[in-house]
Amino acid sequence: MAACAGASFWLAGGAQSGSRVALLLSAALFCQFRLLCNLFDGMVAIEGDKQAPDGPFWNEFPDRIADILILVGAGYGAGVPALGWAATALAVLTAYTRELGRACGLPADFSGPMAKQHRMATITAAALLSLLEPLWRGQGEVLIGALWLVAAGATVTSLRRAANVVRALRAR
């Protein structure tokens, strides 16, 4: 789903009129499908009592690949690949910081302001708002703004989570 979303974003950057609309709608839809797949996978594992020793790996690793595919695709589609890569790196850092805290024996910190669901909501909304860009002869400004928002929010999220980890470790 994330590969389809990322490819849709990327291809939308060079598409015109009807094709661009279809690709942006596809990107938004596949971002949401990505979240649903993640939700259903966890529900099956937990509710169906099908947890496996390697479950935590399969819970995290595909999410990071999904972040990369979607945010980098949006960056290329908006014509600013470096911003897509930067937003991606910062998004991955939020998960890394959470998992670093867990590795230190702390509970998982899913705080925001730019946790996974917030990133996907932002990029989905940007895909939909990008449909209006022809009204001002724009193409890519909304995605660029969303990528900046994801990058800034992920920075704040990472710093917040890191401070929470340090605070909790010092309190021990």
Image (cartoon, rainbow, N blue to C red):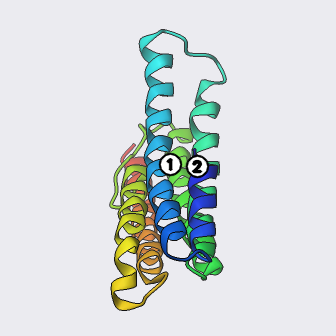
Q: Which of marks 1 and 2 is nearer the N terminus?
A: 2
Instruction: Name the quarter where the C terminus is drawn.
Output: top left
Element type at marker 1? helix
Residue visible at 38% across and 48% down? Answer: 168
Residue occupied by mark 1 = 30
Residue visible at 48% across and 83% down? Answer: 139
x then y, percent, for residue 40:
45, 27
Distance, label 1 to label 2, CA atoms, is 6 Å
Give the class, few, some or many, for how many residues have Cα within 10 Å of label 1's Cα (few <14, many ≥20).
many
x then y, percent, for residue 124:
40, 59
> Are dots 1 and 2 in contact, CB under 8 Å?
yes
Query: Would you say 122 lies left or right of 48 here?
Result: left
Give the class, few, some or many, for how many residues have Cα within 10 Å of label 2's Cα (few <14, many ≥20).
many
Given residues 141 and 168, the one toward you in this image is 141
Given residues 10 and 49, the one toward you in this image is 10
Residue 39 against residue 72 in the figure, above or below: above
Residue visible at 33% across and 61% down? Answer: 113
- Residue 46: image quadrant is top left
Query: Would you say 67 lies left or right of 164 here?
Result: right
> Which residue type carries mark 1?
Phe
The dot on residue 41 is none
Element type at marker 2? helix
Residue 103 against residue 153 in the figure, above or below: above
Residue 22 against residue 133 in the figure, above or below: above
Residue occupied by mark 2 = 2
Q: In this figure, what is the number of numbered marks? A: 2
Given residues 107 and 42, the one toward you in this image is 42
